[in-house]
């Protein structure tokens, strides 16, 4: 399977800094308990295990992955992901985490993005041999889905964002776009579809710095930064590599371990973590939970002014839904691996039977993703499925002659947190209001929006902070990809 050229995925840990050889586990290392078995918690746990800490992960469910997980759907009899998750070449910490746990070879990479209009006309965005940031220009100029006015609008906006050194965090993307004279087609077919759906929020609910970061990372800094990766196995299976890694390094995962409360013993300098199965004693604690789960746990943690402030900040965070429609057809309806679908409710098509070996390659297992659509999330199952299948046939005529074998609608109402103007003041740092306790989660102050990369970064931040607090100055955070081409000077 193709891999991003800047990461040799066949040699885990070879190229990315921070993936140093693990230290031997020593009894002198303090015990660490990580609450939460999502990407943030697993990245923290595996980073700490690589430094020789004895680590225990407490996960309330019976499987790993958090919001990036999979399960056996009882109605379909199929293992499905709770939603399609993708990574990009710029997601250095997520890639580093996958390399550490030995699953990076289970990612399918593609540098092409096919945009399809109703009726089937296609435009393909892919990098050329021109230096960054010009590598994407030929494809945009050739794209038939954009008018001349659209292309001029996008060129003006990209250039303005490239030269914008300090985007105003109090300004929304919608306001900025209005002041930069974007055409109707540019708004509908790029800013709304690609950027708003990538950040899973309406344009007026996106802080300008986060939109600028997406544009720089995916489209400007380097040709490989925007390469898209998708798991060739169910997401929870991908995360099982973390369990294998932890157990090989003296750690363990306890499933079905819901944490009800935790208290700090100032005499022994230890945490007493209460679960339904008993009390865990730990020297150090990492809370790697979604923000609403953190808020639910706060009343059962030690009270102080810092905890009150943390609770107030969490109240400012808001979730946005993502809906996904899973469809199984009796024949192949398209040769494409994935596509962006224009001008309709369904935004992204992932043809998973083409890059997941366990699927029937003679049929089509399709996942459709509807981002930033609260209206679609209110539809009944029947209404949502009919709308999705009717619209899919507008892009792929073969749908009309294929037989739909089964279908599943998944509404992930807490898929991502929003990044509206001013959100950074509400995002917590790695430190916590309590001694020997650290925070992780995609909602913390990572500098990234709600992504698996943000979660992995937060876990590496927390693991690194623990090491540094004990005098170990190792680096666990994987650096960003460096800009290439002309962006070395323009960036």
Image: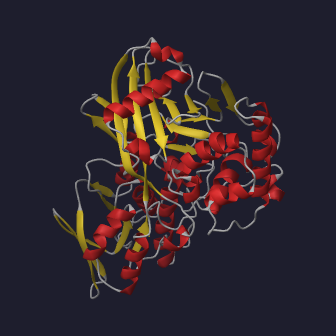
Residue 13 vertical position relative to residue 117 in the rendered view, above or below: below
**x 46%, y 72%: residue:** 466
**x 44%, y 65%: residue:** 317
Query: From this viewpoint, which residue is outermost toward the bottom?
Result: 267
Residue 294 vertical position relative to residue 233 in the rendered view, above or below: below
The N terminus: image quadrant: top right
Front-most of 242 and 4? 4
**Residue 321 position within the rendered picture, expressed as x and y whole percent measured from the top left:** 42, 49
* Quarter holding residue 83: top left
**x 47%, y 17%: residue:** 399
The C terminus: image quadrant: bottom right
Front-most of 432 and 470? 432
Q: Count the numbered circles shown.
A: 0
Whether residue 34 can be seen here: no
Whether residue 308 can be seen here: yes
**Residue 22 position within the rendered picture, expressed as x and y whole percent measured from the top left:** 48, 58
């Amino acid at each position: 399977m193709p891999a991003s050229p800047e990461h040799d995925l066949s040699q885990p840990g070879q190229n990315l800094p921070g993936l140093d050889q693990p230290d031997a586990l020593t009894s002198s290392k303090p015990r660490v308990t990580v609450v939460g078995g999502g990407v943030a918690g697993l990245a923290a746990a595996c980073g700490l295990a690589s430094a020789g800490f004895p680590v225990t992960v407490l996960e309330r469910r019976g499987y790993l992955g958090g919001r990036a997980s999979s399960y056996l759907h009882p109605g379909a009899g199929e293992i499905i992901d709770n939603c399609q998750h993708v990574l990009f070449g710029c997601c250095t910490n997520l890639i580093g985490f996958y390399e550490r746990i030995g699953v990076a070879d289970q990612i399918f990479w593609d540098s092409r993005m096919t945009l399809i209009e109703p009726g089937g006309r296609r435009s393909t965005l892919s990098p050329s041999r021109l230096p960054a940031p010009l590598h994407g220009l030929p494809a945009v100029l050739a794209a038939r889905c954009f008018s001349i006015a659209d292309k001029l609008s996008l060129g003006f906006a990209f250039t303005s964002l490239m030269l914008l050194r300090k985007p105003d965090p109090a300004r929304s993307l919608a306001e900025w776009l209005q002041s930069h004279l974007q055409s109707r087609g540019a708004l509908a077919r790029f800013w709304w579809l690609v950027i708003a759906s990538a950040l899973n929020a309406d344009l007026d609910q996106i802080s300008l710095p986060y939109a600028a970061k997406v544009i720089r990372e995916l489209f400007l800094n380097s040709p490989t930064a925007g390469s898209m990766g998708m798991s060739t196995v169910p997401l929870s299976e991908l995360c099982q590599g973390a369990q294998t890694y932890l157990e090989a390094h003296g750690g363990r995962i306890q499933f079905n371990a819901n944490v009800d409360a935790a208290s700090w013993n100032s005499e022994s300098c230890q945490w007493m973590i209460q679960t339904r199965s008993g009390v865990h004693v730990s020297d150090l604690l990492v809370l790697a939970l979604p923000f609403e789960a953190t808020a639910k746990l706060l009343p059962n943690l030690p009270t102080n002014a810092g905890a009150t402030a943390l609770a107030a900040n969490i109240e400012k965070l808001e979730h946005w839904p993502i809906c996904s429609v899973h469809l199984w057809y009796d024949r192949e309806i398209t040769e494409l691996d994935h596509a962006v679908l224009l001008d309709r409710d369904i935004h992204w098509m992932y043809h998973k039977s083409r890059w997941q070996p366990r699927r029937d390659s003679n049929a089509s297992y399709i996942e459709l993703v509807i981002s930033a659509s609260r209206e679609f999330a209110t539809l009944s199952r029947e209404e949502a499925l009919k709308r999705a299948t009717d619209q899919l046939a507008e892009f792929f005529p073969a749908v009309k002659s294929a037989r739909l074998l089964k279908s599943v609608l998944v509404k992930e109402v807490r898929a991502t947190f929003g990044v509206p103007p001013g959100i950074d003041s509400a995002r917590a740092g790695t430190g916590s209001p309590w001694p020997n306790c650290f925070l992780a989660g995609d909602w913390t102050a990572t500098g990234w929006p709600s992504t698996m990369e943000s979660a992995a970064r937060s876990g590496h931040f927390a693991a690194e902070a623990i090491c540094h607090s004990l005098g170990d100055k190792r680096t666990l955070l994987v650096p960003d990809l460096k800009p290439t081409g002309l962006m070395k000077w323009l960036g």
